[in-house]
Image: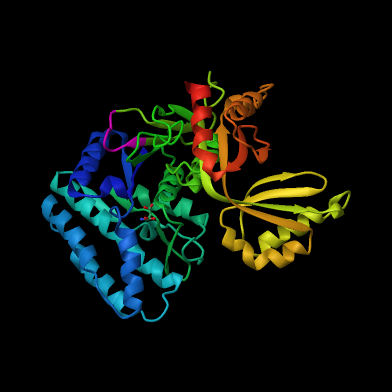
Amino acid sequence: MIVMKFGGTSLGSAERIKKAATIIQSKLDDKPTIVLSAIGGVTDLLIEATNRAAEGKVDISAIKKKHLEIVNELGIDTSVFAELDEFETLIRSYSGEVNRMQMDEAVSFGERICTKIMAAYLIKEGVPAKAINAYDIGMATDGQHGNATLLDSSYTNLKNQLSSISELAIITGFIAKSPQGKITTFDRGGSDYTAAIIGAAIGAKEIQIWTDVTGVMSADPRIVSNAHTISEMSFDEAAELSYFGAKVLHPKTILPAVEHDIPVIVLNTLDPTVMGTRIVNKSEESKEIVKAISGKKGITVVNVSTSRMIAAPGFLADLFGVFAKHQISVDMLATSEVSVSLTVDNAEQLIPIMDELKALGDVTVAPNHAIIIVVGEGFKKQIGKAAPIFEVLAQNEIHVEMISQGASEINIGFVVEEDNAEKAVKVLHKHYFG
Ligand code: ASP
């Protein structure tokens, strides 16, 4: 048994849906369960239409047009238009500000419609398929709309319910239901997570994430023209990369797969025969020290310095207490006896906490920075591994402001000025891969 998940860009047109269907048909012997995102761009259109409807302007023509073109071109007969009417009636009932619960119900139509289209097309092609809303087979979360947390009971329920479905199951990604019976969603891009949960529930042999790039690259190919596809990497390496800018995988995807030791394979719908990246719990011993170099721009560095920290237990707890209270997530951290440097994603978030931070010490805030990370299991237990990184940066006159290495020892991260971010990625990629 395998799980195959297709993302929005792999489903963006009738032609792409046909391609995805051909890939599915070629894997029937592996007993696949299919998980789909909404058709590319549709989730954004649904959000837009919902917000406009709440302001009194109901217009779903763009969404209708997109689906109508696809359905016509595929030559299928579906209940898609009944769903679109249902969506229109729903958003007509919204007024004023749309809350997250209402938004979840509205965006759920993207996945609900897409699965119906794929199932209808596969049936037309002679494959007995069935569109299934994930919540109808046990995908359950808490009631935190927009970013819901999975309830563990889902695993057993999904397993039991899926075992009684004889057709090829085409399941909605991204959406679930709360114990109150309301539709919930995982974070944006959450269909990967759905795929991992289903894979874990049924004990799949592998989870295939079909997207529009060939696997995980050694660097962003827009920055480094000779970036290559990484053939195999560990979950830890992939998680580090996805947190720091590599857009291929939703970080949460990693968890259910890791916990159940199921490999995740990232493949390209447009180039299905090319081997993508295999992400496994523990990767084979690799010759390369480094697997990838990635960067994240738009970072703000916050420095808090105070002599109060010297031998003062609890200072860091107070400092992080401020961030925790305001739900601001901190990416990177470096501390000395008299100062703490940390990075946040968004300088605006700091405005409401500045007074609380100033009460703890002298605060400086430096926006327009970037975090660069160099990732590789090969770093572990390697003496002198960091030296070449900083030598290369120095040779290229790139000033490094903060350095950190996590306990996992598989990445070295540092902060540079945003203007130097691309140069840093380029020179390091050249150093490690030529
Ligand atoms: N359709 C959702 C989104 O656009 C979920 C997904 O694509 O994974 O975020």
The tally of labels here is: 0
Q: Can the viewer see residue 166 in this picture?
A: no
**Farthest right residue in view:** 311
- Judged left or right of residue 116, residue 243 is right
- Judged left or right of residue 43, residue 199 is right
Name which residue lies at 65% across and 27% down: 386
Name which residue lies at 33% across and 47% down: 7
Q: Which quadrant holds the N terminus?
A: top left
Q: Can the viewer see residue 252 in this picture?
A: yes
Q: Judge whether 352 appears above or below 276 on screen.
A: below
Per the picture, the main secondary structure of the magenta-coloured stretch is loop
Q: Quadrant of ligand 1?
A: bottom left
**Farthest front residue in view:** 397
**Quadrant hosting residue 407:** top right
Place of residue 387 in the rendered image (x, y in percent of width and height, measured from the top left)? 66, 25
**Quadrant hosting residue 33:** top left
Place of residue 197 in the rendered image (x, y in percent of width and height, measured from the top left)? 45, 48
Residue bounds of the magenta highlight? 267-273
Name which residue lies at 46% across and 47% down: 250
Q: Judge whether 211 appears above or below 325 on screen.
A: above
**Quadrant hosting residue 362:** bottom right
**Which is nearer the eye, 421 or 67?**
421
**Which is nearer the eye, 394 or 311?**
394
Place of residue 326 in the rendered image (x, y in percent of width and height, measured from the top left)? 64, 64
**Which is nearer the eye, 316 or 433?**
433
**Farthest top residue in view:** 287
* 158 in the magenta segment: no
Place of residue 351 in the rendered image (x, y in percent of width and height, measured from the top left)? 63, 65
Q: Judge whether 134 appears above or below 163 on screen.
A: below
* 269 in the magenta segment: yes
Q: Judge whether 3 appears above or below 381 on screen.
A: below
